[in-house]
Image (cartoon, grey):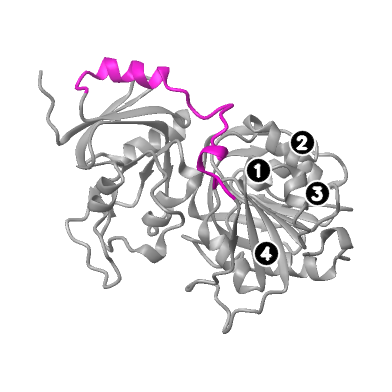
Amino acid sequence: MKSDPKRALIALEDGTVFAGRAFAGAGEAFGELVFNTSMTGYQEILTDPSYHGQIVTLTYPLIGNYGVNVEDAESARPRAAGLIVGECSRIASNFRHTQTLPHYLAQHRILGVDHVDTRAITLHIRSLGAMKCVMSTVDPDPASLVQKAKDSPGLVGRDLATEVSTDQRLTWTDPGHGFGAPAAAAPPRFRVAALDCGMKINQLRLMARRGCTIEVFPAASTADEILGTRPDGFFISNGPGDPAGVPQIVRTVAEVIATGVPTFGICFGHQLLGQAFGGRTFKLKFGHRGANQPVMDLTTRRVEITSQNHGFAVDLASLPDEVETTHINLNDRTSEGLRHKTLPVFSVQYHPEAAPGPHDAAYLFDRFITLMEQQPRPATRRPA
């Protein structure tokens, strides 16, 4: 039987199959099926390298109505393996748009499927957990697709960070525009070594606006290579996959923080620090993905509404006494922030760069600057 180029099937490893229409791209896409509850920000979500290896279901019913533009991208191209939406808008009406969402996805050969009951998909994942998935416009046999989903690699144990990381060192000084910009960008004062495990561009912008020159390192870099630049601070980015699948990166992080360099980790970086401290990580049932996750700062008892994207978490019970839990998720009480009691190191599980998302957590970048200001700067860490 000849397949309909517009018809698409979405098959899960548990045997569940959904039907829809391919509004962009063709062929087959493999990944872990997840959902995101954000109402806006689909371009930032698609270009977030943390979504590498995942097929994203967006719960908001109409997607694509404001199109796509260069400024809102969080990396050079879409990183999600595929996109599922209820309805893709037929027009893009925002004055800033330079492309429509279907054209953007097709240009980068990303399969997009709509006319799907995204509420049913979300309820299924919430009940049974995120699972391996294949979307196809070329194989009309549901049983064949379910088997392909079962045979696909999934995320557990995989090193995906090195697949999305930069392949060469680069320097970033561009403060960019938009959210979080001070009245005038601060002059360069600090050199930050940033480990790129799947970094979002807005993290670099926010540090540059606060007077940082950022040396971006590939995820496979060694501690000697990072410390050889004599950084004033060390930043560990977000990224995709299983943090337990990158023991070599955990070793690098442990060696760098042992020198006393001020360190800030976000999301995957938070998980790497948890392991570098001697803790463990585990896979969440369906992860936290959206722009409205409530998190409590245990020091101030203040609740922040946060943007999140992660499928793994740090096991709080596994952390040593010298590590303090600073933030928790109010929905499931999982780890959202850590601080070492003697080393100048802290991290959060959520995304304070807020693209997309609320502005509640931008102060964390100021905290990183303050940490570098307060920390003695040994000659071995000063720029040449």
Say which residue label 3 marks: 257
Q: Tell which circle, 3 or 2, labels the residue nearer the N-terminal end.
A: 3
Q: Which residues are magenta?
A: 139-168
Label 3 residue SS: helix
Q: Earlier in the sequence, mark 4 or mark 3?
A: 3
Mark 4 neighbour class, 10 Å CA radius: few under 14, some 14 to 19, many 20 or more: some
Give residue 373's quadrant in the image: bottom right
Q: CA distance from mark 3 to mark 1?
A: 24 Å
Position of the C terminus by quadrant: bottom right
Q: Position of residue 213 (x, y in %)?
A: 65, 67
Residue 92 x/y as whole percent: 22, 63
Amino acid under label 4? Leu
Q: Residue at x 67, y 69 (%)?
A: 212
Q: Which residue is mark 1?
A: 334
Q: CA distance from mark 1 to mark 2?
A: 14 Å
* Mark earlier in primary sequence (4, 2): 2
> Which is more N-terminal, label 1 or label 4?
1
- Residue 228 visible to the viewer: yes
Q: Residues within 10 Å of mark 1 (few under 14, many from 20)?
A: some
CA distance separating discs 4 and 2: 23 Å
In reply to whether residue 288 is colored magenta, the answer given is: no
CA gap, disc 4 and disc 1: 19 Å
Which residue carries the number 4 mark?
Answer: 364
- Relative to 36, residue 99 above or below: below
